[in-house]
Image (tube, rainbow, N blue to C red):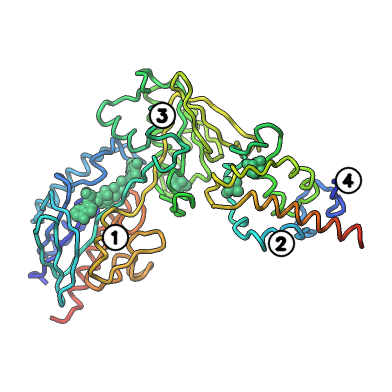
Amino acid sequence: MNDLSFLKPASRQIDFDNFDDRLLLYVLKYEPSFFTCISCGGCTATCSAGNLTNFNVRKIGLWLRRGETEKLSEEIQKCMFCGKCTLVCPRDINIRNVILLIKKRIAMLKNENTTA
Amino acid sequence: MNNKHVAVIGGGIAGMEAASVLARQGLKVTLIEKQANTGGKLNDWDHLFPDFSSPDELVNSLANKTKDSGVNTVCNTEISRIERNGKRFELRANQDVRFFADAVLVASGFNVFDATIKEEYGYGLFGNVITSVDFEKRMKKHGQLHTIQGTAPKRVAIIHCVGSRDAKVGNTYCSKVCCITGIKQAIEISEMLPDCEVFCFYMDLRLYGSKFDSLYLQAQKRHKIQFIRGRLSEAAERADKSIQIKAEDTLQGRPLRMTVDMVILLVGMEPGVSTSQLIQKNQMTVDENGFLKSANMHCARNQSTQEGIFMTGTAICPMAVNETLENARSAATEIIHFFENRRP
Ligand SMILES: Cc1cc2nc3c(=O)[nH]c(=O)nc-3n(C[C@H](O)[C@H](O)[C@H](O)COP(=O)(O)OP(=O)(O)OC[C@H]3O[C@@H](n4cnc5c(N)ncnc54)[C@H](O)[C@@H]3O)c2cc1C
Ligand code: SF4
Ligand code: SF4
Ligand code: SF4
């Protein structure tokens, strides 16, 4: 049900030639600060969900920037929207909003996919 | 040119070096320092990276140079204003003291980031969280490092980028010298306390100097210092006064927790406290980071945006000692050219 494999075929390599930017462009449009992430891990270290599960919010952002969208829809369900990540980010990124936008966009894409 | 008078504001190493070069060229130079002694921040440092040399020796030799070259040094005097008056400048100190000069050199240095602003790191709240500045002062005074319980630390965490590269505190620039300061201090701890484990938590290691990477190599090879790529998110004090820190080990991709006896915060460099006063009543401006702005980043680094006012050292941007001294000599050259090219 949460399988987004239709967005990208499985492969070991990060495939920049078949980059699926449908999620990324949407997130960047509404939260452009997201592109300034330096992968410092401050968000992951403080994340409520990440301390209980294997959820890693920094990696969510990284997957998004690499067009690796297939794991995202399931992973982001673990976020509790507490906003702690946003408080520590040295780049002042509204990370909570990034997760929200990913959720929103995935719902849109699913909709397109089923109605198409 | 010989009857021209240059006032140098700030008797740190930048001001001292520039003043002595100018005086040796025959200019009349007054060096004005707000503290009781010249030397600036170096008076607090115990040893200098990258060669562990003595800051006191350096400051003494600069003091001798200024004296021998005939610089008039005035201490305990803080300049609060530089007013332009035709082709000359009038400098005002707090206690109704005035100086007149044909050119001014601002060498007012930098300010150390106040670590209490990053509340989540517990500086000022937890006794075993100290800064790199505290480390230098303690080493200089006592020659050893103790926890507040009076024991020798067995595990120390050194935290990079405190007050630098952090939009949350308004400083997005890199302070340049703290990565190498952390490595220097890590080596010093390990030499002093061979059983102590030292961890550096970094976002990027910026070891730009020609001798800096060999110190990094030495830290790994000889001292077994461990480097963990991840930014500290928070620190908490435990009942026994040890500190628990949290970060992500970003290379593993997993959150990390560690209990340490001491935390050292590598505090960054900020624009000097008097900068905002000194730019009033003249055309000087500051750059996007709040440091004094150069007329041209490449070919007029020491010229301010006000003709006749020059600047040098860490009043311009973060610099190490060798860069500061080179920059001071370059400022002196620009001032000499300024007088040579000026119609009488
Ligand atoms: C923790 C730490 C450790 C460091 N360790 C090293 C190291 O090991 N090796 C190295 O190469 N570099 C090191 N540095 C960098 C070094 O401290 C600087 O390069 C150096 O201090 C710059 O000298 P300066 O003269 O520009 O500024 P400062 O040292 O800040 O001197 C400025 C002077 O101006 C005076 N002043 C300011 N305003 C006024 C005013 N309005 N009127 C009169 N006087 C005024 C101040 O009192 C001060 O004496 C370190 C920096 C930090 C933060
Ligand atoms: S805290 Fe901000 S900069 Fe650091 S990894 Fe998270 S999103 Fe990126
Ligand atoms: S908002 Fe979500 S990602 Fe951010 S700290 Fe809370 S649980 Fe983690
Ligand atoms: S020199 Fe290193 S510790 Fe200092 S601000 Fe730059 S990256 Fe951070």
> Within the image, what quadrant is residue B93 found in?
bottom left
- Left or right: where B37 falls relative to A37: left
Residue B56: assigned label: none
Report if residue B13 is visible in the image: no
Q: Chain of mark 2?
A: A
Label 4 neighbour load within 10 Å: few <14, some 14-19, many 20+: few
Q: Which residue is mark 4?
A: A1
Q: Which residue is mark 3?
A: B126
Distance, label 2 to label 4, CA atoms, is 24 Å
Q: Which residue is mark 2?
A: A25
Q: Secondary structure at mark 2?
A: helix
Depth order, front residue of B291/B338? B291
Residue B162: horizontal and vertical position, in percent? 44, 43
Residue B170: horizontal and vertical position, in percent? 44, 53
Amino acid residing under circle 4: Met
Confirm or deny contact between disc 2 and disc 1 (CB under 8 A). no
Confirm or deny contact between disc 1 and disc 4 (CB under 8 A). no
Residue B276: assigned label: 1
